[in-house]
Each structure stands twice: as C-alpha cells, then as structure tokens.
Amino acid sequence: MSDVKQRSTELTTPVRNFSLQLSPTPRGARLARLLAVEQLRSWEIPLDPARQVVAELSVNAVTHGRVPGRDFRLLLYVVADTLRIEVTDTRGDRLPVLSEAGRGLRLVEALADRWGTTAGLPPRKTVWAEIGLVPDPKNLDFGGAGGFPEGTHR
C-alpha cells in the first residue's frame, strides 16, 4: 500500500441557492420577484439590478414560455462574488431573441454582466443571467431596508 495524501477541494466561500416552482401566470411572475427580493435581503445582496432581471425573466417565462399545466422554475445561487439567476420554462422550442418590439431581454442585457440560454431535458429551456456582486457604497438598497438611490440604479 502506498501512503498517498489526498487534498480536499473544498470551496472557501459558501454556495447559497434558492429555488421555487411557480405557476405560469402573472401572479406567479410577481411572486417570483417578491420572493427573490426577500431571499436577496436575507443573503444581504444588493436588490438591484437582480430584482429587475428576475422580474423580466419571469414575465418572459409566463408570456412566451407558458404551457397550461406546466410550472416555471426560478433558481438563484451565489458562488463567490457572482449571483446567477435562472428561469426554466417548458417551451424549449421557443428560444428568446432580442427584438425591437420587446424591451425585456434588452433590459436583461443592459443590467446583467452575462446572460444566455441553456437547453434542458425536453421540453425545457433555461434563460440565465449573471450579476457581479461588488458592493457599491452609493447603492442604498444593498440587501437591507435601504431606500432607492438617486438617479440610475446601476
């Protein structure tokens, strides 16, 4: 027998995650935003721009990814200094596209550091966005009970 030491590859930062399954209705999209905000507060993570990204991706899932009787899923997770927002719906055949008519994905593109889509098990797709979590001292709405900062929220 050899005396080999194995190193553990443990993460040095905690991984936090939050997942919800919601009805593909306007109420479900609203609940996704409200519950995501409460989770971000509990993690002491800036609410904006994540709040707007969750709202836009959830509304898109309800509007364009809705199949009666099939829910959509919201997943938030944080690894190191990145928040990843994922919204999975059951319309894998309808991939999101940036268009002149809609503003939702244009907002996501403007607010997130990165975004994209991932095919899931048929008939699912996931639209995701990543936001860096560098505290901004001018952002009074950082997790806790702060107010909106003056001017832009970015």
Image: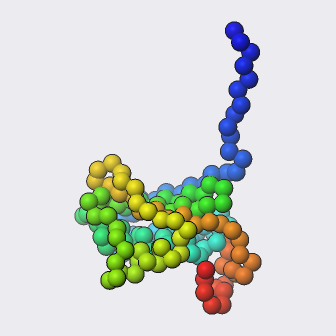
* Residue 51 appearing in the image: no
* Residue 23 appearing in the image: yes
Which residue ends up furthest to the bottom in the rendered image? 151
Q: Report the side of 81 relative to 127 (left or right).
A: right
The image shows residue 43 at horizontal and vertical percentages of 65, 63
> Which quarter of the rendered picture does the N terminus lie within?
top right
The image shows residue 91 at horizontal and vertical percentages of 28, 61
> Which quarter of the rendered picture does the C terminus lie within?
bottom right
> In terms of depth relative to the viewer, which is nearer, 33 or 118?
118
> In terms of depth relative to the viewer, which is nearer, 96 or 24?
96
The image shows residue 96 at horizontal and vertical percentages of 34, 68
Q: Report the side of 44 relative to 130 (left or right).
A: right
Give the vertical position of 92 relative to 2 (above or below). Answer: below
Residue at x 56%, y 57% (from the top left corner): 77
Residue at x 35%, y 65% (from the top left corner): 23
Residue at x 32%, y 55% (from the top left corner): 124
Give the vertical position of 149 relative to 62 (above or below). Answer: below
Give the vertical position of 23 relative to 47 (above or below). Answer: above
Residue at x 68%, y 45% (from the top left corner): 11
Colour scheme employed for the rendering of this structure? rainbow
The image shows residue 42 at horizontal and vertical percentages of 64, 65
- Quarter of the rendering containing residue 8: top right
Give the vertical position of 154 relative to 80 (above or below). Answer: below
Which residue ends up furthest to the top in the rendered image? 1
- Quarter of the rendering containing residue 17: bottom right
